[in-house]
């Protein structure tokens, strides 16, 4: 009878150990300090802007441009790119913001901060995105504009 009592008392402990081992993937890697690195996702066949670009914020010396595209895939390290200037035919200035893709999402939100703007000036811009290697995702917006206060 004593053996049956001991087994009953150990049952909750055994269930907890099994459950915890299922929650911690690659426990051996966690103990060794190695993180699991996923390979880059296959690049999307066609990357398109699904929302925006739009002006999220504008001040007299800065602006934040935001847009959403389907997930471009490729390397996790990506950059949102804004090419801008005061002439819609000469967008010679570039602002760039780092982003890390979440391969589990079907879309990606890009936000780029554009600094060094002049007050009461109209700026024209277009957006793009690129992998860390510099390879463009092949998405480019039409030229849009905003005016600083």
Image (cartoon, rainbow, N blue to C red):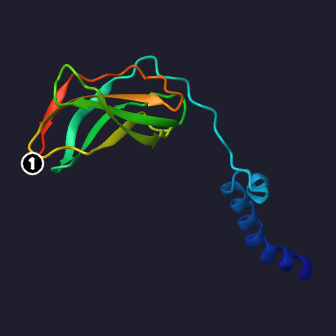
Dividing the picture into quadrants, the one containing residue 10 is bottom right
Q: Which residue is mark 1?
A: 149
Residue 4 horizontal/vertical position (percent): 87, 76
Question: In the depicted view, which residue is nearer to us: 33 or 98?
Answer: 98
| Residue 77 visible in the current orientation | yes
Residue 142 horizontal/vertical position (percent): 22, 22
Q: How many marks?
A: 1
| Residue 1 visible in the current orientation | no
Q: Is residue 20 above or below residue 133?
A: below
User: Dot 1: few (<14), some (14–19), or many (≥20) neighbours within 10 Å?
Assistant: few
Q: Is residue 89 above or below residue 40?
A: above
Q: Is residue 26 left or right of residue 63?
A: right
Please identify the quadrant where the N terminus is shown: bottom right
Report the residue at 70% width, 62% height from top. Answer: 20
Q: Is residue 91 left or right of residue 121?
A: right
Report the residue at 54% width, 28% height from top. Answer: 133
Question: In the depicted view, which residue is nearer to us: 3 or 80?
Answer: 80
Q: Is residue 99 left or right of residue 36?
A: left
Dividing the picture into quadrants, the one containing residue 63 is top left
């Amino acid at each position: 009878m004593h053996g049956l009592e001991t087994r009953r008392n150990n049952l909750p402990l055994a269930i907890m150990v099994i459950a915890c081992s299922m929650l911690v993937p690659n426990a051996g890697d966690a103990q060794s300090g190695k993180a699991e690195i996923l390979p880059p996702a296959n690049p999307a066949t066609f990357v398109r802007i699904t929302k925006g670009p739009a002006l999220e914020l504008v001040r007299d010396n800065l602006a934040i441009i935001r847009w959403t595209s389907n997930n471009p895939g490729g390397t996790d390290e990506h950059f949102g790119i804004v090419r801008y200037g005061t002439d819609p035919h000469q967008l010679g200035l570039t602002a760039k913001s780092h982003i890390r893709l979440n391969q589990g999402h079907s879309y990606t939100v890009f936000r780029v901060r554009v600094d060094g703007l002049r007050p009461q000036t109209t700026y024209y811009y277009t957006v793009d995105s690129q992998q860390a290697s510099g390879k463009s995702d092949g998405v480019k917006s039409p030229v849009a504009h905003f005016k600083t206060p």
